[in-house]
Image (cartoon, grey):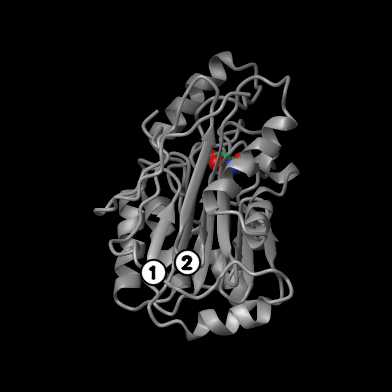
Amino acid sequence: MKRRNFIKNSAAGTAGIISAPLLASCEDKKNTAKESAATTSVKPIVIATWDVENATAKAWEVLNKGGSALDAVEQGVMMEEADVNNQSVGKGGRPDRDGNVTLDACIMDKDSNCGAVVYLQNITHAVSVARKVMEDTPHVMLAGKGAEQFAYEKGFQKENLLTEKSKQEWLEWAKTSKYEPIINIENHDTIGMLTIDSNGDMAGACTTSGMAYKIGGRIGDSPIIGAGLFVDNEVGGATATGVGEEVVRTVGSFLIVELMRQGKSPQEACEEGVRRILAKNKNKPDFQIGFIAMNKKGETGAYCIHPGFSYRVFSELGHTNTPSNSHIKA
Ligand code: ASP
């Protein structure tokens, strides 16, 4: 498994960042919003789950040219959706147990607008369909055939998402699997991304082909706002990867943002998010969960669990502010 490094990539120059008080209590939320809008020294930054250098580089390119946080997350994660070597996202993703590649994605902007698609087939850029749901419909989420039909109406092209490689691996799996999905293997590497643009505004996106060889129709956390992704432009954002069922039942990303709102750092909030999940899984075999988070100051945090296996969390592009490796055992 190539993607064991749980990486956050951030842009050069995030060390200085903003001075406005940004972790607000409910009472001073309004003032804080005004102050942060007035902040001029914000430095763009992007963080993403896993070692997705092309995706973070693309998002950074958008931000560096003065593009919006929203454009940056969309274009950033699209890189992974189009990359057939990433078998957890978009085209080339591993199929469900019946051999169908089904995609889940969501996106959220600075004004808490959000869009999502679930069980989307035959379209590579699920995140862009999710953005269209957000911007062009009164809805938040479209599923299955309806989502696919909507995508065609919006000009998306039909594509076969099942590559030969993923097909052959699935056929191998099917020989011995007894048709039973296994939840703990490292066959899922959703990309979640959070950005801050030069206006100090935040956005997030999350996109996945979900758990490999899942039961047809299974949806994880990734397209569910609050679970796989949550952004509150007054506070910060969080996104998840790993066993979606666990993230959904703790509303993980929302929890982490709320913990940041209460004053926890992104790192503390991610650790607490993982701890909550562990506390509910004392007797379960090992499984994998990772969260990343970023607050409005551009401070970042990441925490993962995979008992018996550690994930690295680090920054690149010259950052010295490197969080230590962290993993905890159930
Ligand atoms: N969270 C995703 C899901 O449960 C899988 C992953 O992160 O790779 O569908």
Residue 196 placement (x, y as % from top left): 44, 68
The quadrant in which residue 131 appears is: bottom right
Question: In the rendered image of this protein, does residue 298 appear above or below residue 283?
Answer: below
Tag 2: residue type?
Answer: Lys
| SS type, badge 2 | loop
| SS type, badge 1 | loop
Residue 246 placement (x, y as % from top left): 69, 37
Residue at (47, 34) in percent of width and height: 326
Residue at which label 1 appears: 17
Residue at which label 2 appears: 297
Residue at (68, 77) in percent of width and height: 28
Q: Are marks 1 and 2 in contact (CB under 8 Å)?
A: yes
Real-space CA distance between mark 1 and mark 2, rounded to the nearest whole angstrom: 6 Å
Quarter of the rendering occupied by the N terminus: top left
**Circle 1 crowding by C-alpha within 10 Å: few under 14, some 14–19, many from 20:** some
Tag 1: residue type?
Answer: Ile
